[in-house]
Amino acid sequence: MSLRLIDSLATTEPLADAFSDAALLTAMLRFEVALARAEARVGVIPAAAAEAIVAAAVPDAFDPAAIARTARASGTTVIPFVEMLTENVRAIDPSAATFVHWGATSQDVSDTALVLCLVRALAIITADGDRLEHALRRTSDRHAGSAMLARTLLQPAPPTTFGLKAAGWYGAASRGRARLASAFRDACVAQFGGASGTLAALGPYGLAVSTELSRELDLLSTDAPWHAHRDRLAWLVAACGTYTGTLGKIARDVALLMQYEVAEAAEPGGGSSTMPHKRNPAGCAVALAAATRVPGLVSAFLSGLPQEHERGLGGWHAEAATVASVVQATGAALAAVADVIETLSVDPDRMRDNITATRGVVFAERAMVLLAPVVGRKTASRLIADAIETARRGDRTFAEALGESTEVTAAVDGADLSSLQDPDAYLGVAERFRRRLLGGEE
Amino acid sequence: MSLRLIDSLATTEPLADAFSDAALLTAMLRFEVALARAEARVGVIPAAAAEAIVAAAVPDAFDPAAIARTARASGTTVIPFVEMLTENVRAIDPSAATFVHWGATSQDVSDTALVLCLVRALAIITADGDRLEHALRRTSDRHAGSAMLARTLLQPAPPTTFGLKAAGWYGAASRGRARLASAFRDACVAQFGGASGTLAALGPYGLAVSTELSRELDLLSTDAPWHAHRDRLAWLVAACGTYTGTLGKIARDVALLMQYEVAEAAEPGGGSSTMPHKRNPAGCAVALAAATRVPGLVSAFLSGLPQEHERGLGGWHAEAATVASVVQATGAALAAVADVIETLSVDPDRMRDNITATRGVVFAERAMVLLAPVVGRKTASRLIADAIETARRGDRTFAEALGESTEVTAAVDGADLSSLQDPDAYLGVAERFRRRLLGGEE
Amino acid sequence: MSLRLIDSLATTEPLADAFSDAALLTAMLRFEVALARAEARVGVIPAAAAEAIVAAAVPDAFDPAAIARTARASGTTVIPFVEMLTENVRAIDPSAATFVHWGATSQDVSDTALVLCLVRALAIITADGDRLEHALRRTSDRHAGSAMLARTLLQPAPPTTFGLKAAGWYGAASRGRARLASAFRDACVAQFGGASGTLAALGPYGLAVSTELSRELDLLSTDAPWHAHRDRLAWLVAACGTYTGTLGKIARDVALLMQYEVAEAAEPGGGSSTMPHKRNPAGCAVALAAATRVPGLVSAFLSGLPQEHERGLGGWHAEAATVASVVQATGAALAAVADVIETLSVDPDRMRDNITATRGVVFAERAMVLLAPVVGRKTASRLIADAIETARRGDRTFAEALGESTEVTAAVDGADLSSLQDPDAYLGVAERFRRRLLGGEE
Amino acid sequence: MSLRLIDSLATTEPLADAFSDAALLTAMLRFEVALARAEARVGVIPAAAAEAIVAAAVPDAFDPAAIARTARASGTTVIPFVEMLTENVRAIDPSAATFVHWGATSQDVSDTALVLCLVRALAIITADGDRLEHALRRTSDRHAGSAMLARTLLQPAPPTTFGLKAAGWYGAASRGRARLASAFRDACVAQFGGASGTLAALGPYGLAVSTELSRELDLLSTDAPWHAHRDRLAWLVAACGTYTGTLGKIARDVALLMQYEVAEAAEPGGGSSTMPHKRNPAGCAVALAAATRVPGLVSAFLSGLPQEHERGLGGWHAEAATVASVVQATGAALAAVADVIETLSVDPDRMRDNITATRGVVFAERAMVLLAPVVGRKTASRLIADAIETARRGDRTFAEALGESTEVTAAVDGADLSSLQDPDAYLGVAERFRRRLLGGEE
């Protein structure tokens, strides 16, 4: 298995597999096979050579550990890999060995192999993204009318609905995934430029081989090789960073709602090694961990962009580990948040109780809206401050305290006062915003 | 002037102005004026109140230093600003003071004001971006035939053309700017949600006011307030990061070409305080400095994305300084690189001399392509290694050394050998790639 | 004033002053004055020249805006600055103009000037650090016996004391400040190496001038110039990052305790522009904003470390803005947290109420410790799970529910059961740890 | 083997082993064994239980893949690990199963296990650090007299010596390692606090068990548990970042010196998959890759510092993967740079040739020092500019051109002029600085 203890919270098993030795080796072999076939088809190498290369490209015939071990000596895994492949081809057909990796450079292989791993990762992320968005829409619809405290700067504010909150999560999650999908599409292109990015070794056949190669790999090709222009990969990494930030935001909200003192929503969570009573927000922890780690990884990638000349030194060599970490962390956060939302328990009664527990002070803004146009803002401020003070002492609610002031009752209709603390009557256009976010209203 | 010594290399004067106290104060006043007008039009506040607010919204009547000084006490510049505005309105029309900032929350002001500054910055960046791309196209066209050493891992490789190199810069620069423009477009939207993001204080008029407000500010509005969903700003920041990486890549290439020992291209550069002979790549330094700083700033922004509930604590408060730094650094790099390319001197003769100075060894790959199909890769490797060794000793060129081997002359046509070291004969599809990158060929 | 609106939450007024144009210009002049005096004393330049330089070095005779505006052309503020100084000296004594900046390089000036600003910043940070640590000790001592819920993964756990929590903050804050002080000490050294870091222009007098220069500036000198070795500054920046992380931890804890639903402690906080009832944790917001921004800035600095040869290109040019931002953000966080702790209101009764509100389930671990050795872990787990379930239904407390099981009463002493939910009886060595953290016990 | 293809350039085999599943599992078992022994010794658990735990703690009896797979459900590897251990103990002695992990919390295990891995990594890093510093000293001594161009902003400057350059590398490398060693020392402490950091489950025996536990593990203990105070680990990570920056600086210098056009020094390097003539700076690539990646990882760690209350959510969960990546990348860079310096070939003749190739213009500062005090700076500037212009045209050297001016010959001694371009005569105090950096002179 490719999942390791040290980063077991930073990936998922399918994503760990997508960047495993087996996956990477297979991808490198796919490149060499596709190259041989493309070159044979175009007539650059003999058909028999291509056949021998295809026959030799059996993953089991390679020792990834040996490749990994010698990679540092040449600064790339490709050189030991190509040597191994050449020997394996030679064993099948000595004359074919000449045509292994014909006209390609190491970076053509490693970049394209990374892209092939990314294609695989995207499929996993897409499935979990669908799952999350579906669960968020359902949650939002179900709780369209569940009034709850808005909280700003971690302090209670006038009510919102849990439906709107979930719709806000949905909006950001779907924007994030759209960016990610677009960035993957742009980045998942074949790399093929040869030693200097001119395909000179292929003479007049460079473009033809390039076209066939991409077709074999089911990848798009670009206008030109991108050996030292890594902006498309950077954009993919940045899209992961932005998406993971949104996933972290959802996780933080859930974890805060799940506090014992708040208790408005909860993921099933995980247990504790020592405290039998505990239910820990383990899914939120995984997502928040990713949201903590990924920004730095994005920075690491971007720092490497100024790569020297036709193929850089160091910047490029820093990428593979970073890209793999970013994509896995993003996918781990996504899977965790999808699980959290799919299994989220929500307590609308507790939400209303928490509004009530403020004794109405969160409706002070509403009182201001009623009073200020009549008595002026300064007087209104004084009256409201007094009522807040009374409510905080705990004897009466904010509305009751207001109602005891003749200045207030002279200015405000009794009905307005009696419904002042009704959450459902002070939700503004929450439902309109909710539906817009879900795309149901223009 | 808003340009400061400490970050004089990290911005330009126009961009420093775009985020200056005057700019920010003006933007905050524009929000309050637009809000008052919108609310008067919809009928939420009296027309007279709006007129008083418009009359009071004169930048000179505000003391940005006083606002800045008290901002930390409330965690926002908006509270002291609104207090000042309210007093100024009161002096004009006491009854109008009630309706200042009506129904808005602090973050509505600060977010929209930041967006208005960004709109201004985008115009500056667009002009410099046009300038850069124009200069790159011109440079690429002019040097379509200027053969030069490709360099990979900072070592000489078979030739490319300076035209292709400049076209690669162009491709990445234009992709980067397209991303930036798109991200600015998405992010430059008004913010208006009121205390809890429901516009509850405006009763049934929330959406109408919101629409009018955006129109007044000449901004698009979004589906819903984005107080705690900062992904659009994150995307803008990430676009800056990716673009700056490309600008850094161009700068690094130029600085390397400008080394005394290479001397293939040079920016006019700046002088030295102590060395009369020196011409420093000052423009490249500015761009590389930005490419060094911006990735960390991107990380700083992304780290703040998991913002709590309806309006967060800390994450949001970290943004303004970061966004301003990122956009200014990006614009500083862009202006510097545009200057560098517009004034770049290129020495095609030196480029060819540097190819010649390798004594032909960079054509070893070409020799391999000729020899290996005939004599096999192993024999070809031995023959080429011997010739490289001879060329390195300095007596003969690589091609001459090869020509002394009967094994070679038996295998390879004499004409091929005599043109082996001709750069123009080993450029592959460089020109095709170049034209594709410039968009001139599908 | 040097405080700006855009980063008014990211600095304090004294720290903004420490990196202002005036401060930086003064520091640059101090370098040139000290250099002239040192060189006159050693006999490298005429005494009269030094006198003219001293006379000309009047900040008011310089235009920082003009310097800032031209800095980008040469990649440094020092070249226009030295030109201006030279002209000013020439006006006083033409022959002295020759000896301005004699033997120094631009970076000698800019690095030393930055160091002089840092020395000033350190004094500010030291005072606030003392203030914070004093307040933390006092808070810890006062609440040595204030039992409260520990919270792990944001879920309630067996009790701790607020005294221990505050002592934990103290321990980390004092470790952080010790690192910071040590790193400032190492980094605040003069820079003086001349064009190539050999002081060649001073012939045999290089070391003597260097020694005198440091003495004039009241700075230590190092073994050698550090033009391209920025590890000492990096270490200072990293120390800021680590310290700010701890300040952010304190702020996050306070903000969480200040939630309406928790209400165990609160900073006085700031008001809201629209919600009269609100008290926002503004100080915590400032500190958390710094803890969000600074890590990326640290990364930005570290990314620039691989600087080329004797003086680098870009990496060095990226530093000043970054260092100034980091130190200001750190100081802003520190001042905010010091204010928060000095004015923190703590509610020990509410702390106990919140323990009680768990109905005893947080003592499940304690029940396990009592039961498991007698009945085995599996049986104990079952008994405890049942009691938790009963307590969660709300009829009885956890201890009452346990007491109804004959299996439990047979195994556990009645007295143990009746005190099971006594917070003071299950605090372990909290007080010992507290005193150790405060340094009162070995 | 624990080395993987995807990050084969980002670690070394011994370091990959230090964080492998086997290493981590062994470390977790060491904690549980030490805890059991400590508790038995103090009398908290029966001696027989401890014996059973010791007997069961056999790595081969555990399935790391199964642990990794279930870790996400609980947010930690420790819960499935402890369950597995408990079952294994139960199989040996059912009554002992009760006392597995007695009084500890998950984080006690995972933190201490990470520390034990770090201890192992430090030994590897120490050996390579010694190797590097030894090689740098030797290189510096050998080339104390090897004059070479200093290069500032990638442009030629007056000469320095390769001995001083290498001594500068040595100074930074040894400072970096001293910081690293000190930070490791501080961070490599046991973690033991139990559920809430009070060791309440151990009653009066908490401190005694803690002391014994540390002794068993051969670790120091701290004043108190550090579950949510991660500053010591942050400092270690920051020390890695600073050290890696220096290693990247050395690598960048070597890679630049190794350019074909410069050719002053070279690592043996690695070959190319397609270009037989190439020798790539593979060791430099590995080190520069680390210097590119690590700053972002440092940022990722620091971002996680504000951890909630007694044990945080997300911040802590993000650490293990980050710490392991940072330490491995640092060690990979170190091993690579040690190899590079140990095998560096240096060409002092080429160094002198490159000085000569400037035709003396790098001695313009020296001419200024001679001329300006006599003829004034303005006249000197003109004379020097003319001579530089002549030298650049290529007819004569700078000194020859100067010598043709009667203004010059009237002002400057002929001997001074004839030795003007002698590198050895213009090295200032390079040798003094060199010896200071190596510690040989106060």
Image (cartoon, coloured by chain):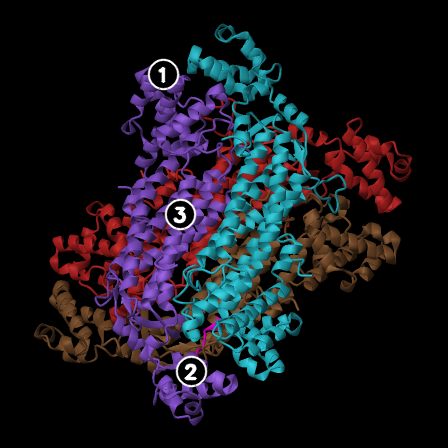
Chain colours: A brown, B red, C purple, D cyan
Q: Is residue B188 visible?
A: no
Which residue is the site of mark 1? C96
- Magenta stretch bounds: A277-283
> Which quarter of the picture shows residue B421?
top right
* Up/down of B437 relative to D225, above or below: above
Dot 1 and dot 3 within a common chain: yes
Q: Residues within 10 Å of mark 3 (few under 14, many from 20)?
A: many
User: Magenta region's main secondary structure?
Assistant: loop
Chain ID of residue with mark 1 = C
Callout in the foreground (3, 2): 2
- Amino acid type at image mark 1: Ala
Quadrant in which residue A280 is drawn: bottom left
Quarter occupied by the N terminus of chain B: top left
Q: Residue at x 48, y 40 (%)?
A: C230
From the top left corner, tell me how far across and down residue B336 is, in percent: 47, 37
Residue placed under numbered mark 3 in the picture? C180
Q: Which residue is mark 2?
A: C367
